[in-house]
Amino acid sequence: MTRNSSGLLEQFHALCERYAEGLPQRVSIIEAVWSRLALASSDETTRDTLRRLVHTLKGSGGTFGFPSITAAATTLENSLARGTLESAATSAYQWREVARHISELRRVAEDVGRCCAPTQA
């Protein structure tokens, strides 16, 4: 490995560490949007924001080499796609299912964050 490619690898690892450290905050944002949606289920903008945030997290998990994030976000994204979340007619089961998947995403994000935190010298 050349010195240049070694430096690039180090930079990528540093980016991955920063990404992992920021995962709990990203999930907090998803949780906050979910809470807003629970109060106003007919708000199309909030629904779209939630779906976009989850989809982005799904993709970035793969980009940075965290398949557990991608898997948890995919499960949540699929759950959001199955339920319309558009009205009071949305079943309590659908709401609980989404909440459960968000909790699982939180757990995975915290595990990844702990696992990948930079070591102190």
Image (tube, helix red, strand yellow):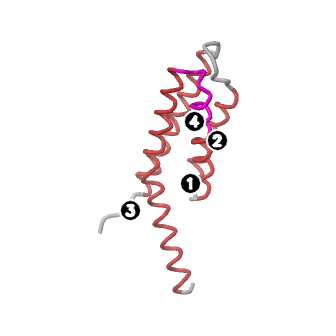
Q: Is residue 3 above or below residue 40?
A: below
For marks 1 and 2, the one nearer the N-term is: 1
Residue found 65% across the figure and 31% down from its top: 79
Residue found 52% across the figure and 68% down from its top: 12
Alpha carbon of mark 4 to alpha carbon of mark 1: how far? 21 Å
Q: Is residue 57 above or below residue 76?
A: below
Mark 1 sits on what residue? 66
- Tags 4 and 1 touching, CB below 8 Å: no
- Residue 119: within the magenta? no
Mark 3 sits on what residue? 118
Q: Residues within 10 Å of mark 1 (few under 14, many from 20)?
A: some
For marks 4 and 3, the one nearer the N-term is: 4
For marks 4 and 1, the one nearer the N-term is: 4
Residue found 62% across the figure and 35% down from its top: 48
Magenta region: 40-51
Mark 4 secondary-structure assignment:
helix
Q: Amino acid at mark 4?
A: Leu
Quadrant for residue 97, please give it: top right
Alpha carbon of mark 3 to alpha carbon of mark 1: how far? 16 Å
Mark 4 sits on what residue? 50
Quadrant of the image containing the N terminus: bottom right
Residue 99: give x, y in percent of width and height. 53, 27
Q: Which mark is residue 74?
A: 2
Mark 1 secondary-structure assignment:
loop
Q: Amino acid at mark 1?
A: Phe
Query: Residue furthest toward the top?
Result: 89
Q: Amino acid at mark 2?
A: Thr
Mark 2 secondary-structure assignment:
helix
Alpha carbon of mark 1 to alpha carbon of mark 2: how far? 13 Å
Q: Residues within 10 Å of mark 2 (few under 14, many from 20)?
A: some
Q: Amino acid at mark 3?
A: Pro
Q: Of circles 4 and 1, which is in front?
A: 4
